[in-house]
Amino acid sequence: MYEKFGQFIDGKWQQSSGKKTYEVINPATEEIIGHASKASPADVDKALKSAEKGLEVWKKTPPWKRSSIIRNIADLIRKKQDVLAKWMALEVGKPLAEGKAEAGGSADIFEWNSEETKRIYGQTVESRFEDTRVHVYYQPIGVVAALTPWNFPLVLSARKISTALAAGCSVIVKPDVITPGTVMELVDICRESGVPPGVVNLLSGDPPSIASN
């Protein structure tokens, strides 16, 4: 099930440089669903370099263009809600109806932030000095690390990814080892929706190893 995914770095799915995997278990049957790619320290370094490169592209992308791409993600999530619901059923035992509801909520979050992208206004503040005004400009701060839990893997990933994209930041997503497929499917939707290479990256595998790097 996980063969078409892996680590998502610089706009491409690729296997770990160490060729290692880990088992993903169906909680209802305790059977092995499949083997997901396990990131190596070299993969973490590659993802960081990719995200830094993606940041330079994304922060210069006009807000209206960013908004359009984020809206594309929302639309594609709605089209693929059955696929996403199936992933959550297999990985966390969530009923299909609840999975579809989570997919719908995730799409709504992306749609909301697609509009917020256009409203990063800044401020003009009166100064206490004569003939002086203070201007506040909001700028992307850098690469965002988005570590997501297993219980609501789609909607919590959506919150972190969509807000980072709306602000003009690139992001590296780290799904929980229980629910890698759900988040991988979401990241692939980002790819299909026109997010430039390096802007959204995914590292799957051992949490302490990835976080410490």
Image (cartoon, rainbow, N blue to C red):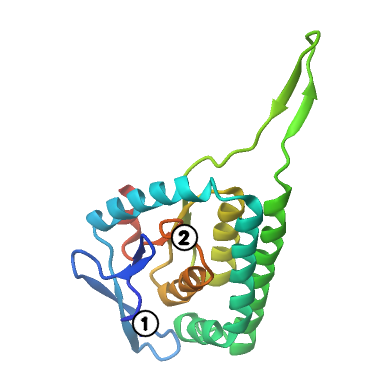
Residue drawn at x 60%, y 61% is 159
At label 1, the amino acid type is Ile
Measured in 3D between alpha carbons, the distance from the residue under mark 2 to the one under mark 1, in whole angstroms, is 32 Å
Q: Secondary structure at mark 2?
A: loop
Q: Which mark is residue 196?
A: 2
Q: Position of residue 133 (x, y in %)?
A: 76, 19
The image position of residue 134, as x and y in percent, is: 73, 22
- Residue reaching furthest to the left: 18
Residue at 57%, 83% (x, y): give it.
Answer: 80
Left or right, 131 with reference to 28: right
In the rendered image, residue 97, in percent from the top left (x then y), is placed at 64, 88
Seen in the image, is 36 located left or right of residue 132? Answer: left
Of residue 29 and residue 96, the one placed in the foreground of this image is 96
Q: Of marks 2 and 1, which one's residue comes earlier in the chain?
A: 1
Asked whether 62 or 54 is in front, the reply is 62
Amino acid under disc 2: Pro
Residue matched to label 1: 25
* Residue 90 position (above or below residue 22): below
Mark 2 Cα within 10 Å, few/some/many (few <14, many 20+)? some
**Residue at the image position 80 percent from the left and 11 percent from the top:** 131
Name the disc covering residue 2, or none.
Answer: none
27 in relation to 136, above or below:
below
